[in-house]
Image: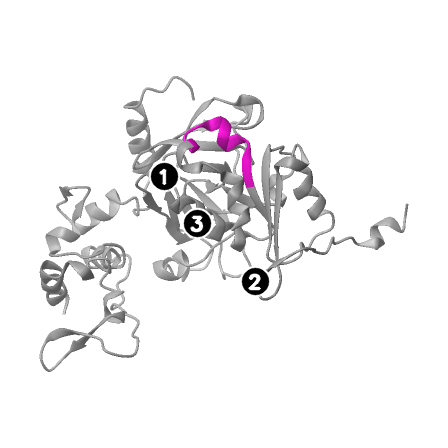
Amino acid sequence: MLTKWFEINQSNVSVRNLTFVEFPSKWTWKQNRQQWEFRLQGRCIGRLPYAHAHSGERYYLRTLLHKIRGARSYEHLKTINGTVHPTFKAAYAVLGLLNDDNEWNEALAEASTWAFAKNYETYSVYLNLRNSYKNSTYLKEHAILAPKMGDVHKLNNKMLSMLPDQSRAYMSVDTFCNTESDNVENMNPPKMLHSLNFPELSNHFLELKEGTPIILFRNLNQSEGHCNGTRLVVTRMGDKVLKTEVITRSNIGDLVLIPRISLMSQSSRTPFPIKRRQFPMKVAFAMTINKSQGQTLKNVGVYLPKPVFSHGQLYVALSCATSPVGLKILIVNRDNDPWDYTKNIVYHEIFDSL
């Protein structure tokens, strides 16, 4: 079945955008003929036999089949950035998916090769983006604000697609943290862990381009002002480290190297704490209203698909703009049509004791 997938990818360019796991959604396996045939109707979710993390090459092959699109051979599965690696594990490691401490050494080595001296209407906020996205002053003065992280994520994906440069994807390493339970070591289903998103962690799949504005959500170096909430712009992308420039607060212009670090989530949605190794930042063309507190911007777009849900949140969003001229608001109703008013949420109880 797998080698037949290789053969189809060799002869059919149009299917090379699919991983082996995604392939059954478009093609179906005919057991009696031992061949793949184009699926005429229905849908199917591809599944691979389980392989434990300690099963060696079988485990790494299974994981690569979730990641590599359009592979034409086993050798192709082991080819990353034009280099053929001796094992599936080696290819897995180059993709940054191996959970080991050697990544710090590789990030330092990569950074040492760089000249680095010191460690709708809402979219109209970003007028002339394609010609100005590498101008740090331009990015400093523009932002879109929304109440919920889901809306922010959609806006950031849209804005990122408007940049002309080639994007680069970074995928996290996710595991359950060690606990007193002996069962945790055998409970690291990668696909399930990758699908989880947490407000305090980066997503498993992180897509970036040079010129992308980002926002830190962990303190990297407090003495230098590289703290939670600092906005930066990506100026160079490596395999293990990002080179960025600060565009807000008192250290504008500072160059900052950001490695991937391991952070934990204590979410009640999972039975055990989750550890995720990823860059400690999020794309920040758009950000939540809460994250924008204390920032002033020349051009602000406020996107309100639903009324804000916290006391004073609408005021926080509107007060980020330095003048009414630079403020644009998009309100939509339940039918997703533009609307001309929204609710200002105020809890009168907080005034009872005044």
- 158 on left or right of 24: right
What's the CA distance linking mark 1 and mark 2?
30 Å
Q: Amino acid at mark 1?
A: Lys
Disc 3 designates what residue? Answer: 158
Of residue 332 and residue 279, the one placed in the foreground of this image is: 332
Of residue 70 and residue 155, the one placed in the foreground of this image is: 155
Of residue 123 and residue 43, the one placed in the foreground of this image is: 123
Front disc: 2 or 3: 2
Q: Is residue 309 above or below residue 230?
A: below
Disc 2 designates what residue? Answer: 336
Q: Amino acid at mark 2?
A: Asn
Element at label 3: helix
- Mark 1, other Cα within 10 Å: few <14 / some 14–19 / many ≥20: many
Residue 36 visible, this angle:
yes
Residue 284 shown in magenta: no
Q: Amino acid at mark 3?
A: Lys
Q: Is residue 301 above or below residue 63?
A: above
Residue 186 visible, this angle:
no
Residue 136 shown in magenta: yes
Disc 1 designates what residue? Answer: 209
Residue 214 position within the rendered picture, expressed as x and y whole percent measured from the top left: 47, 37
